[in-house]
């Protein structure tokens, strides 16, 4: 249907006398009880839109004389300071005071508070200035924050304090999701803190700013946001609201993390058997199902059905089209004839993991689980099998985050690979297990095999990954729970054609400061890659290391 033509001429303006004679407010109770001063000729020519929006006496914006009520004059600056938000929305928006460690942790945190406003104390800018030098992750984040603040400040028409006090629109640099404003501390705030707190400490100065803002804005909620637990405790002890920065968390509860495995209901065949299609291809059985279960499935999710007296079903979802899904039965790696470099699956989840690790169409695999569930052993065995037997990949590359559990032992001598040697104890242990598999080769044969295996495994440091591209490699990222989401993105984007990346980690053993189970890079990757046709995830539940290790992981 074509749109109507635009009007040919502008409508005539309504005369002020006719406006006042013909239009009345829709609600009689909207007029104030106080007597209204007589409007002057300047007020009589006020724009009609102002009267339609607010059926109240003429405000200072409409040209009224100073005899207008002071209450109207008090409302006018609030309306002009936030033209994009209504007065009610501006009052409901909170004022968040950011601690320095929030900006150091997430440089884009300025734009994560939706419609709320942000206040930066002067001491926060001073602390940022003190951490901008260096090549660490913190220094890079600080420099990015400084660039963002500079772009926001560049939108100012002048450098006057009055214009800075109005606030900078956070959406001015293209971040449409940030509807609030950024306020800098433009004047000295001298608020005495309790005598027990020293005045010279930066944290205490920020607490003083929060306390002063709470007094300056009694009708508004002022909240301190900090990653420092002790600072939040001190703020609450002073009666100041404080919160953790939670926007970096992928999940609030780690129990909600995608496991990659789903148990089929006991009546699966009864509810889905009537409309099911099945066929065989290459020794594998496929099932096309339609029913209430399909909306709960994801591509590459692993499903199983175990019932007493019936043949168990272990399958992977390979396709979801509309209201139908295709299930593909899995290879049984628990049988010795399907052993991978001498390793067989000891439980259901290990069998699922080996199916993903040996699948050439699965480019990205994540394995999580407690200590002793076989993550590193299975990954290394499948990597050796595909590098040396199948020639699918040219070599194995192993890397991990060098975060010590206890005190750091200092600098390590040697080349990059020699420096990474002490961190790769888990790799050496698993290679020793894999080398013991062939007892018929003799001592000389085992030594030759070890040399061949070692030549196909390269150990790389995480610090030198920027700018690299891995072609046709099998990449293992061990202890991935200690990676930040940004580091995880840096590693995964190194993958070139024909490369497979496997991330291993235990979310209960995070050693990196400021990282939790919800904000870990491993959690981030599992959540973002679920449902992609070329990725898979398995949470390994049962430990297979030893009865001692299994009992210790449960009770300690």
Image (spheres, rainbow, N blue to C red):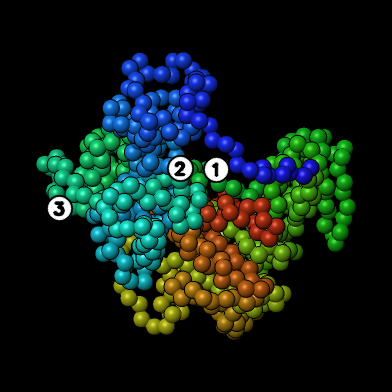
In the image, residue 509 lies at what x, y percent?
44, 54
Marks 1 and 3, the one that precedes in the sequence: 3
Tell me which numbered mark, 1 or 2, is placed earlier along the sequence: 2
Q: Which residue is mark 1?
A: 256
Within 10 angstroms of label 1, few (less than 14), some, or many (20 or more) residues? few
Q: Which mark is residue 84?
A: 2
- Mark nearest the camera among 1 and 3 is 3
Identify which residue is drawn at 26% across, 64% down.
Answer: 130
Q: Do the numbered discs 2 and 3 sit on residues whose CB atoms are within 8 Å?
A: no
**In this view, 378 is above or below 88:** below
Give me the residue at 27% from left, 46% from top. 231
Q: Is residue 84 left or right of residue 358?
A: left
For mark 1, give the secondary structure.
Answer: helix
Mark toward the viewer: 2 or 3:
2
Front position among marks 1 and 2: 2
Dot 2 or dot 3, earlier in sequence: 2
- Badge 2 crowding class, 10 Å Cα cut-off, few under 14, some 14 to 19, many 20 or more, is few
Residue density around tag 3, few if under 14, some if 14–19, many if 20 or more, within 10 Å: few
Image quadrant where one finds the N terminus: top right
Q: Give how far across and how far down residue 99 sits, in percent.
A: 31, 51
The disc at residue 200 is: 3
Q: Position of residue 203 (x, y in %)?
A: 23, 50
């Amino acid at each position: 249907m074509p749109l109507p033509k635009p009007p040919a001429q502008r409508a005539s303006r309504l005369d002020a006398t006719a406006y006042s004679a013909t239009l009345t407010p829709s609600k009689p109770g909207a007029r104030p009880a106080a007597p209204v001063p007589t409007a002057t000729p300047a007020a009589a020519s006020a724009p009609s839109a102002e009267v339609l929006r607010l059926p109240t006496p003429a405000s200072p914006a409409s040209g009224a004389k100073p005899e207008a009520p002071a209450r109207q004059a008090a409302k006018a600056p609030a309306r002009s300071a936030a033209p994009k938000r209504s007065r009610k929305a501006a009052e409901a928006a909170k004022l968040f005071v950011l601690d320095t460690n929030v900006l150091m942790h997430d440089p884009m945190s300025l734009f994560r508070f939706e419609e709320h406003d942000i206040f930066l104390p002067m001491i926060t800018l001073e602390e940022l200035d003190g951490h901008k030098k260096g090549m660490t992750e913190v220094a890079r984040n600080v420099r990015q924050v400084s660039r963002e603040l500079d772009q926001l400040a560049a939108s100012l028409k002048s450098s006057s304090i009055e214009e800075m006090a109005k606030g900078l629109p956070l959406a001015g640099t293209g971040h449409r999701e940030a509807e609030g404003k950024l306020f800098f501390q433009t004047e000295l705030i001298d608020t005495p803190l309790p005598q027990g707190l020293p005045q010279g400490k930066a944290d205490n100065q920020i607490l003083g700013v929060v306390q002063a803002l709470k007094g300056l804005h009694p009708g508004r909620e002022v909240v301190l946001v900090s990653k420092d637990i002790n600072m939040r405790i001190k703020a609450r002890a002073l009666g100041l609201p404080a919160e953790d920065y939670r926007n970096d968390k992928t999940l609030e509860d780690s129990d909600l993390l995608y496991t990659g495995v789903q148990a089929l209901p006991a009546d699966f065949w009864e509810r889905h058997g009537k409309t099911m299609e099945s066929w065989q291809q290459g020794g594998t059985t496929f099932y096309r199902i339609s029913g209430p279960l399909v909306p709960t499935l994801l591509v590459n999710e692993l499903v199983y059905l175990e019932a007493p007296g019936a043949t168990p079903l272990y399958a992977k979802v390979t396709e979801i089209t509309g209201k139908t899904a295709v299930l593909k039965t899995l290879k049984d790696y628990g049988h010795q004839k399907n052993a991978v470099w001498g390793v067989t699956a000891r439980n259901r989840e290990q069998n699922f993991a080996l199916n993903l690790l040996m699948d050439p169409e699965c480019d990205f695999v994540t394995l999580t689980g407690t200590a002793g569930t076989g993550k590193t052993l299975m990954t290394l065995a499948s990597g050796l099998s595909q590098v040396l037997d199948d020639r699918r990949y040219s070599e194995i590359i192993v890397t991990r985050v060098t975060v010590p559990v206890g005190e750091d032992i200092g600098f390590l001598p040697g080349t990059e690979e020699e420096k990474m040697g002490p961190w790769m104890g888990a790799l050496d242990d698993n290679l020793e297990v894999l080398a013991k598999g062939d007892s018929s080769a003799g001592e000389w044969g085992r030594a030759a095999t070890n040399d061949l295996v070692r030549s196909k495994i390269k150990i790389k440091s995480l610090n030198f990954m920027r700018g690299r591209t891995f072609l046709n490699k099998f990449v293992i990222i061990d202890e991935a729970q200690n990676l930040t989401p940004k580091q995880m993105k840096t590693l995964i984007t190194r993958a070139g054609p024909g490369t497979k990346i496997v991330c291993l980690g235990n979310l209960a053993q995070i050693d990196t400061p400021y990282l939790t189970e919800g904000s870990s890079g491993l959690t981030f990757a599992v959540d973002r890659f679920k449902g992609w046709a070329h990725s898979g995830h398995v949470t390994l539940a049962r430990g297979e290391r030893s009865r001692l290790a299994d009992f210790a992981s449960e009770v300690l």
